[in-house]
Image (cartoon, grey):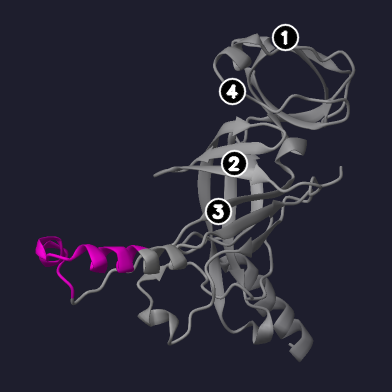
Amino acid sequence: MNRKSFYFILFTLILFVACGKTDETPEEDDMDVVSQSYVAIGDSMLYGLACDGCSDTTLVLLPDSGGDPVTYSIVRARSEKKFFGRPQIGDKMAVMVNPEDPTEVLVVINLERVKGTWYYEQLPVLRRRAHIDSAEVQQMEFTEEEKARFDSLLSTLMIPREYAYTFKRDFTMKTEGGPPRTSSLDRDLPVVYPPMTRYMEWHIFNGKIILTYGGMKIAGMKDTVKLTNDTAEFVLLRNDTMALRFRDHVQGFRLRPDTLVEK
């Protein structure tokens, strides 16, 4: 076996291993990664383009699988708050058809409304000190001057930072903002910014959105970081507002002006 064939096989094996799941999260925000496509095995969503004839009660969809446009009732999806993003002609749509009624959809997601740069502002939190007992701190007495001085100092440190995600048309993602790089001086500050998960792909799966992070370092092909998925549900999706429900919280986003990704 020659050297070129050996490296080709090695690279293929690494890609296969990188498709597993792990709890590891890359901490370097500038790490070069190879993005792996999410394989939607078992996805029951139907994808297609919105056609002329859509209304408040019906969706006319041209399926990606081919054939003529199909008209679906969206009354139930709207009443159960499973309708996300009013469609316009040519918008890429994802719908879940009612298995008991092929003329009705249970979930409607306008993928064009997801594309763009969504952000939220994050305030820092008080840093926990291992050597300080919180119960003892609560029992301590401070003068009004000391309290005012502390509140003034805290207000200068409570500066919000933007945490932003760009959802691209090829289902990849770009992450911006987040906590600043720390230094030895930052470790002495009483506040710290929460970490930011640096997603690199997004996909729709059975009415939910799958956000993928992790990847593989390119340099030298020595160290690998496996892929991990976070699953969230749409709560709200409007022209400039989006809310996603994760396992332990609901995160709201605002759309940056003029960042809507072109079709």
Dots 3, 2 in contact, CB < 8 A: no
Circle 3 residue: 121
Relative vertical location of residue 28 with respect to residue 74 in this rendering, above or below? below
Q: Find numbered disc 4 in the image and state the secondary structure of the residue it sits on.
A: loop
Report the amino acid beneath label 4.
Lys
- How much space separates mark 2 and mark 1, taking CA atoms? 24 Å
Circle 4 residue: 82
CA neighbours of label 2 inside 10 A, class few (<14), some (14 to 19), many (20+):
some
Report the amino acid beneath label 3.
Glu
Q: Is residue 105 magenta?
A: no
Report the amino acid beneath label 1.
Thr
Could you tell me if residue 147 is visible in this image?
Answer: yes
Q: Find numbered disc 3 in the image and state the secondary structure of the residue it sits on.
A: strand
Q: Specify the farthest residue to the bottom.
A: 3
Relative vertical location of residue 31 with respect to residue 214 in this rendering, above or below? below
Give the residues drawn in magenta, as a range. Answer: 132-151
Circle 1 residue: 57
Between residues 90 and 160, which one lies in front from this camera angle?
A: 160
Dots 3, 4 in contact, CB < 8 A: no
Of marks 3 and 4, the one in the foreground: 3
Q: Is residue 149 magenta?
A: yes
Q: Find numbered disc 1 in the image and state the secondary structure of the residue it sits on.
A: loop
Between residues 112 and 128, which one lies in front from this camera angle?
A: 128
Where is residue 225? Give x, y as percent. Answer: 54, 71
Circle 2 residue: 209
Dots 2, 1 in contact, CB < 8 A: no
CA neighbours of label 4 inside 10 A, class few (<14), some (14 to 19), many (20+):
many
